[in-house]
Image (tube, rainbow, N blue to C red):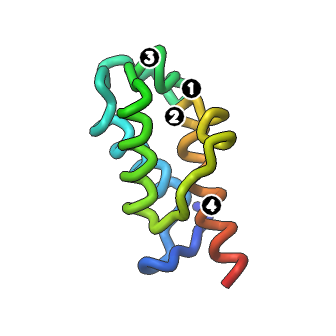
Amino acid sequence: MSEQTPTLAGPTMSDEHIRTKVKAIVLDLAPSPEGLDGTETALVQDLGFHSLALMELAFALEDEFDLDPIDEKTARSITTLHAVQEHVLHRIRERAAES
């Protein structure tokens, strides 16, 4: 059975659906999407993200999932596709727990 994550923007989405949606956004914005090699794909080394593209990715994820802006320390620790997916899931769960 798939885990469900509540969202404020709409009905509950499965964790897998959120991961899939995050992956699609990352690949859509990646300068070199052909570098994808599983969830441990590095954003900078494999997908070619640079500082401006990383900012664009952060804004896109904030808009799509209604997230608060990410702080710089956390942003620097997110280096793989998997880390992006887990960060978004964590932020959605955190927000749901507060409401």
- Mark earlier in primary sequence (3, 2): 3
Q: Is residue 55 above or below residue 15?
A: above
Callout 4: SS: helix
Percent from the top left, x then y, of residue 25? Answer: 35, 45
Give the amino acid at mark 2. Leu
Give the amino acid at mark 1. Glu
Residue positioned most to the bottom? 99
Q: Alpha-carbon neighbours of circle 2 within 10 Å: few (<14), some, or many (≥20)?
A: many
Q: Gap in Å between the C-alphas at discs 3 and 2?
A: 10 Å
Q: Alpha-carbon neighbours of circle 4 within 10 Å: few (<14), some, or many (≥20)?
A: some
Percent from the top left, x then y, of residue 86? Answer: 62, 47
Callout 3: SS: loop
Residue drawn at x 44%, y 17% is: 46
Q: Gap in Å between the C-alphas at discs 4 and 2?
A: 16 Å
Residue drawn at x 45%, y 58% is: 62
Q: Which mark is residue 91?
A: 4
Q: Quadrant of the N terminus?
A: bottom right
Residue on which the image places disc 1? 40
- Mark earlier in primary sequence (1, 2): 1
Q: Gap in Å between the C-alphas at discs 4 and 3?
A: 25 Å
Q: Quadrant of the C terminus?
A: bottom right
Percent from the top left, x then y, of residue 38? Answer: 49, 26
Q: Is residue 72 above or below residue 92?
A: above
Residue on which the image places disc 3? 46
Callout 2: SS: helix
Tell me if 42 is positioned left or right of 63 in this view: right
Residue on which the image places disc 2? 81
